[in-house]
Image: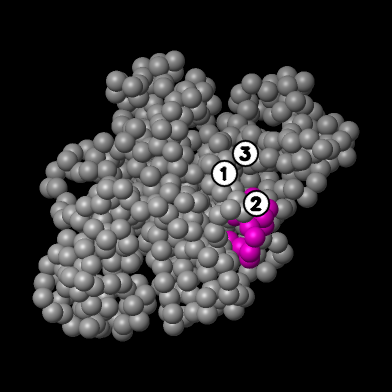
Amino acid sequence: MNILATDDTALRALAAMPFLDRLELAAASGLTERTAHNALIRLREGGLADFVQHAGPLTASTRRWYVTACGAGLLARTDETPVDRLLRRLPVSAHWQRLLLERLDAAAVIYRLASGLAAAEGDFRFRWYRAAALDAAMVLDGGRTVGVIRQGAAAERTAFSERFRRLLDPREDVPRALLALMPDGARLRQDRRLLARYPGPAFLAVEQDAANALSGDPVWHLTSGPAVLSLEEVLERLRPGGSLPVEPPLSRRSPPRDLSIPPEPENTQGHLLPVVLKASHKGVLDRLAGWPLITAGDLRSLTGFSPSGLSQVITRLERLGLAAKFRLAGRSRLSLTRRGLTYLARRDRTSAADAVRRWSVESANGEYPADWREVAGTRSRPLARTIEHTDGVHRFLGRMSEQARERGCRVVQFDPPHRAVRRFRHRGRLRSIHPDAFGILRRGGETFPFFLEWERRAVRPGTMATRLAPYLRYYSSKQPLDDHGDWPLVLVVFDDELAESNFHGVARREMDRAGVDVPLWVSHTAILERVGPLGKAWRSPKVLEPKHVF
């Protein structure tokens, strides 16, 4: 079969970068958008390429194209090389196809970034990685090399740090520069110190900002200093040098497969989930990952879904085997299944076994717990044991989300306890704070970061002082400012007004003794039920009249 030169160019670009959309293909191949569109139509008519429909949490719904087995065979014949050698050289085998589909939400953002680089460069080569520390790497005009590393929302900081440190091995080849995609601004700031150890220049961006930015938009942060650069400015700073890591080829290679979607959700294979799920489904999965054991009512408040809309999403996730509904402590609750945890772990390149061990609610035989002692996960079990406390945090954040939507505020992020931890050095020792949540609200040009402490046990003065001590250490330096670019509020909620009043006296005494001013704001559940977190519900040790803090 003979094909047009433009079709050959498009097919080769898809072989090097499977699952490009039309616009990304045009940028990567150097074709015009119309030429790329026409080439894709002809390739599909000839059975050489096909597409899947995909919508990511950060990218719009689009057709993503891949080379079929016939297309791979044609490329092999054109190059006068065996198909097996082509599959060894390019990421078009069935194994690569499965791997990239599992990571397709992440790949879509990386392709958006790569197409921006390709559009600005004449010479451009791209490489995916299966198991290396990097997600991808590129060679640009003039021998400049750039690596891309992504920390997904489900990736814990320790695992990401270990992965990054593999790039510091002097025996390993690394690109000259590094682009790091981070899940949110807080983790970007925390990881700047880590990425400063990279042997070349490193630039960090919040993944959502990188996905939505034009080439001239300033979203890329240096590892030190306040400067924020555009992608164009990043390119201007790149110098020749560096080399791309090389992975050993796959031991078993089979041609790419047809990616037909089964009509019944129950029959969907795991690697096809990213193309079966809608963006709204994926958003709910991320919420369930952060807030296991949540009730449908609190989840609805967090997400803004209508009751019927959320019911449809949950039903779909249950049919796909990704989420489960069960009763615990007298209430119906939602959590991810083992399959749901595995789906997110593979998307974000983390250990699925670790995710299941820590967060699975169901037992090994698939049964759901009737008591907290039966919860399997090492991290979900303590949440179940203190379920009233867990419900209180969920209810608070849900109510805050509702009020934010009503009042024109935006919830930038809510982090669950395991992501809200902050570690710091104090007098030569490693210390930490462990809030129940961390959040950021934005209203107009103002940003309000905050920690939440939902207190049920700290009702004695000595216990209150003990709970306050880590915050006194944390706020005794500029570490909060370094971590967040601002001074986060510390919101403390008690069960009753008496405990709140007692805490004010303890807090005043402890802050005076330490000479540290913690931005404490304190409330109790009764007033929060009446006016909500964004109402006049907060008092500080220095301001005893209730007032707004947001």
SS at mark 1 in the image = helix
Q: Is residue 40 left or right of residue 508?
A: left
For residue 210, the mark is none
Amino acid bearing label 1: Glu
The residue range painted magenta reads: 188-205
Where's residue 301, x and y in %? 42, 43
**Identity of the residue drawn at 23% across and 67% down:** 81
What is the CA distance from the residue labelled 3 to the residue labelled 2?
Answer: 17 Å
On screen, 267 above or below 141? above
Q: Which of 24 and 14 lies nearest the eye of the viewer?
A: 14
How was the colour assigned to the protein in this rendering?
one colour
Amino acid bearing label 3: Val
**Identity of the residue drawn at 70% across and 61% down:** 224
Q: Residue tagged by mark 1?
A: 162
Q: Of label 1 and label 2, which has the lower sequence position?
A: 1
Q: Residue tagged by mark 2?
A: 194
Q: Residue tagged by mark 3?
A: 421
What is the CA distance from the residue labelled 1 to the residue labelled 2?
Answer: 11 Å
SS at mark 2 in the image = helix
On screen, 423 above or below 329? below
